[in-house]
Amino acid sequence: MATPNDEAVLPIPQLKLPQHTFILLEPKAASLHPAAKAALLAGIEADEMAPYLASLLADPSTSALLTVDPLLLPKLQAKNTEELKKLEEKLEDAQKNLGETEISDALKAKAQYLARIGNKDDALKAHEVSLEKSAGLGSRIDIRLAMIRVGFFHNDHTVISENIEKAQVLVDEGGDWDRRNRLKAYQGVHLLSIRNFKTGGELLLDTVSTFTATELIDYDDFVTLCVLAGVMSLDRKDVKKKIIDSPEVIALIPTVPTLKNFCDSLYKCDYATFFRSLAQIEEHHLLPSRLLSVHARYYVREMRIKAYAQLLESYRSVTMANLCAAFGVSEEFMDADLSRFIAAGRLNCSIDRVNGVVETNRPDAKNARYEAVVKQGDVLLTSVQRLSRVIG
């Protein structure tokens, strides 16, 4: 196990393992189950994760999917007991015979090990103790980032958000560029996990060219998140500038071709290709993702709205037949989809079913301001009249 003094930030806990667990629990990803199961068990054994394995075996939904050697858990528990005993002895020796730096290092080592084996509660407590003994600002930021990763591993949004806030306070006090950049990446990923694609996307795009937080997420996966968030939240001009022409995205495209079709088709107004690409994005990037799967329906719905709005803003009216041809869907689907979004106030248009036409109702900004001023003036005059009657 690496020491806490290593400059490289260690991937502790190993965040790929809960993703493997998620894949195992996803019936639609049955083809990925054998590889996910093998990677999960190998990771658990490599990191001596007795507490995490025990939690999986105690859960009926996961225990039914895992075929585990009955001797594995006791073996890992014995290793945990032995290693924690060594770490405790090292801490006691530092407290009796060494200085504050050595005590701080021993506390960090214990906290890291508890986080590594998947013991959430004890790991968080150990990190808090380590935080109290750490004098340097950079070291305290690192501990907060480590606690955020524990939250990500166990999908505990309270732990994540609380420690992001505390880490931000520390960074604002004078954190260096690297730690500030890492925190932005952590914030962006967290915001995507709670469906804030706009702010999350801005943070991810702001850090993509200088990304270093590989302990949190692989670089290619990070760029993929940037693309998915950016295409949703940016306007057409910025999609071209910040996504399609981005060197980071261009470098990723050969390994993830679905992203190129997704971005290019929307930008070039090839809506039939865009709809097909959106289905592929849902299948390959949203549903299999522990982070994004719960937002898959929302994401697909918002991207359909964005595509409809982009086409309709160019016309005063368009026939339903032409609209269906542009998107490559049936009239029944288009009528039902548009009706739902119009009724919800998400699209400024109306459907003339008699003539088979969709008419746009562009809100006039100048008229809207004029009506608002008139309305506010009426309210003010009414208040003045009431006041004059009271005074009179």
Image (cartoon, rainbow, N blue to C red):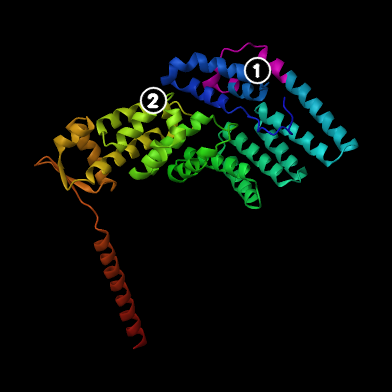
- Is residue 77 placed above or below 228 in the rendered structure? above
Classify residue 17 as left or right of residue 110: left
Q: Position of residue 140 (x, y in %)?
A: 70, 44
Q: Which residue is mark 1?
A: 45
Disc 1 on helix, strand or loop? helix
Residue name at image x 57 percent, y 37 percent: 156
Residue name at image x 42 percent, y 41 percent: 242
Q: Mark 2 or mark 1, which is nearer the start of the sequence?
A: 1
1 and 2 marks in contact (CB < 8 Å): no
| Residue type highlighted by circle 1 | Glu
Q: Position of residue 260 (x, y in %)?
A: 37, 30
Disc 2 on helix, strand or loop? helix
- Residue furthest to the right in view is 97
Confirm whether residue 154 shows in the render. Answer: no
Q: Which mark is residue 257?
A: 2
Q: Position of residue 265 (x, y in %)?
A: 30, 33
**What span is colored magenta in the figure?**
57-77
User: Which is nearer the eye, 275 or 179?
Assistant: 179
- Is residue 37 placed above or below 87 in the rendered structure? above
- Residue furthest to the bottom in view is 392
Residue 264, quarter of the rendered image: top left
Residue 71 inside the magenta-drawn segment? yes
Residue name at image x 34 percent, y 44 percent: 237
User: Which is nearer the eye, 248 or 214?
Assistant: 248
